Image (cartoon, rainbow, N blue to C red):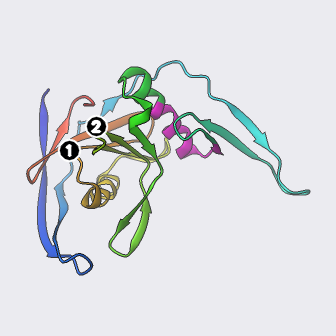
Amino acid sequence: MVSIVVSLTSTTYLCAACLKPVTFFKITKFPSGAMIKIDYPPYQPKIKNETGPPGAAGREMIFDEVRKKWVVLTPEEWVRQNFLQYLVQVKKYPASLIAVEKEIKLGDLKKRFDIVVYDAASKPWMIVECKEMNVELNKQVLDQVLRYNITMQVPYLVITNGSYCMAFQCVSNDLKALTELP
């Protein structure tokens, strides 16, 4: 696997809430040319229209196979559901080791990650941040998943807009852009 090192600077602060050192990373050089094209498996999602109150427009819903529930079909949700199918069908990650849209705390802020894949010991292993297809994968999107990783501390980070994705491995204080998903 060929990798490109992403230029980072880091600063360590003492967390006021837990009194432990927390390291924040800032990207100084974003990797260009590290995009991974995703070949999605055939997938027939379950979609339904849910009617709203009288006079209100209905909503299109998609069944999330991992969460086992119907969710509103937004452009980002479409990307998330297809990427989940890729992880389960192509990469063969067990659905039982995948969490979708769970809340995490970043200091006093409450955020929700898109996808976390756990290892066999139930330890967070990979964070996936999904964006709708017309969103460019850039430094701001990578910064978002890096902020989530302050809490999660996973070895792999992925950002995707459905058409392409970028994968990174966290090694010590380096972030290596990967040419394929782990």
Does residue 162 lie above or below 6 as drawn?
Answer: above
Residue farthest toward the right in the current orientation of the protein: 54
Q: Tell me where residue 59 appears, x and y as whole percent.
A: 74, 47
Instruction: Where is residue 47? Give x, y as percent.
Output: 69, 33
Q: Residue at x 62, y 41 (%)?
A: 69
Foreground mark, 1 or 2, reads 2
Residue type for callout 1? Pro
Residue shown at 13% from the left, 39% from the top: 4
x and y percentages locating residue 175 in the rendered image:
15, 47
Q: Which of marks 2 and 1 precedes in the sequence? A: 2
Q: Residue at x 12, y 53 (%)?
A: 7
76 on left or right of 86: right
Task: Please identify the quarter of the rendering in which residue 107 is found.
Answer: bottom left
Q: What is the C-alpha distance between the residues marked 1 and 2?
A: 11 Å
In the image, taking residue 68 as reference, residue 92 lies left or right, namely left
Q: Which residue is mark 2?
A: 119
- State yes or no: discs 1 and 2 in contact (Cβ < 8 Å): no
Q: Which residue lies most toward the bottom here? A: 16
The quadrant in which residue 160 appears is top left
Q: Amino acid at mark 2?
A: Asp
Residue 12 vs residue 32, the one in the foreground: 12
Judged left or right of residue 144, residue 1 is left
* Mark 1 surroundings within 10 Å by alpha-carbon count, few (fewer than 14), some (14 through 19), many (20 or more): some
Q: Nearer the viewer, residue 10 or 108?
A: 108
Secondary structure character of the magenta stretch overall: helix
Q: Identify the residue at the far front of this view.
A: 121
Mark 2 burial class by Cα count in 10 Å: few <14, some 14-19, many 20+:
some
Point out the stretch of residues depicted in magenta: 70-84
Residue at image mark 1: 155
Label 1's element? loop
Report the quarter where the N terminus lies: top left
The answer to if 163 sits in the magenta stretch is no
